[in-house]
Image: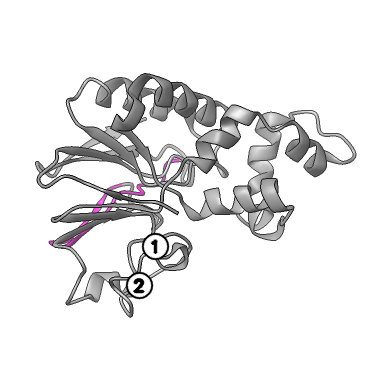
Amino acid sequence: MTVLTLFDEEPLAIVGDVHGCPAPLQLALADLEELDRRVIFVGDYVNRGPDSRSVLALLAAAMKRMGDRLVLLRGNHDVAILDFLLAGRQDAFLRHRGVTTVHSYLPRPSADVLEDFRRTFPADHLAVLQSTVLCAEGAGVLVAHAGYNPQRPTSRTEADLTTGSWAELIHCEDPPQPLTVVGHYVQAAGLPFVTGPLIGIDTGCGSILGAPLTAILLPERTFRAYR
């Protein structure tokens, strides 16, 4: 899977986990599209929240408008739904509350709802998920859904950057970049987690009732919240 190379000192807007919440996503897109910078989403577009279908529809439309200014990283929830859609592996998808995503597509479930979901899933929504990349990295920043594995800080595998969970990140003394921006780790207070070399921007959108979708602007290190 692709690793996107960022330009040196490239201005960025990086957006946290969406988790099936189209309203704050629509606000974020309307705001950030006006900025002269690349917009990177850290992944986890589906599950948990009420309307994953509308989220993927908004992202499909934004891809057409923004072209390569829009970068979608892959989160562990996106891996799970792709594994189900493409290979029929349902355990992780259901464990990650994939039933909420199924309901957004099939509000009146049939007797074989999971197979109907796979069979009728829109091609343009699948294309959004398949377009996702592993991470974005430049000389001064790494953007990855789960960060990096402190035991293998230069590894760029899906297991290390997307589906793993690394509580040790906050203690890592030798990070692969001066700054790493992550989603994945839900901040119960609804505020970003900020240290010198690590910023976490999953502020609970779709996971905690009323929690915001958060974006960080770089190099400014300023935050914007959308509800």
| Residue 66 location, quadrant | top left
First in residue order: circle 2 vs circle 1: 2
Q: Compare residues 1 and 182 and report the one nearer the observer.
A: 1
* Residue located at (39% from left, 62% from top): 161
Q: Where 74 falls versus 95 (above or below)?
A: above
Check contact, mark 2 vs mark 1: CB within 8 A: yes
* Residue highlighted by disc 1: 161
Number of numbered discs overlaid on the protein picture: 2
Question: Where does residue 67 sit, x and y in percent of width and height?
Answer: 35, 26
In reply to whether residue 199 is colored magenta, the answer given is yes
Question: Where does residue 168 sit, x and y in percent of width and height?
Answer: 31, 75
* Residue located at (45% from left, 62% from top): 158
Q: Is residue 101 left or right of residue 58?
A: right
Q: Is residue 146 left or right of residue 12?
A: right
Q: Which amino acid type is marked by label 1?
A: Leu
**SS class of the residue under badge 2?**
loop
Placement of the N terminus among the 4 image quadrants: bottom left
Cα gap from disc 2 to disc 1, whole angstroms:
7 Å
Q: Which region is colored magenta?
A: 191-205
* Residue highlighted by disc 2: 149
Q: Is residue 79 left or right of residue 43?
A: right
In reply to whether residue 120 is colored magenta, the answer given is no
Label 1 neighbourhood size at 10 Å, few (<14), some (14-19), many (20+)? Answer: many
| Residue 18 location, quadrant | top left
Q: Which amino acid type is marked by label 2?
A: Asn
Type of secondary structure dominating the magenta stretch: loop
Placement of the C terminus among the 4 image quadrants: top left
Question: Where does residue 50 sit, x and y in percent of width and height?
Answer: 58, 34
Q: Is residue 226 visible?
A: no
Q: Where 170 falls versus 122 (above or below)?
A: below
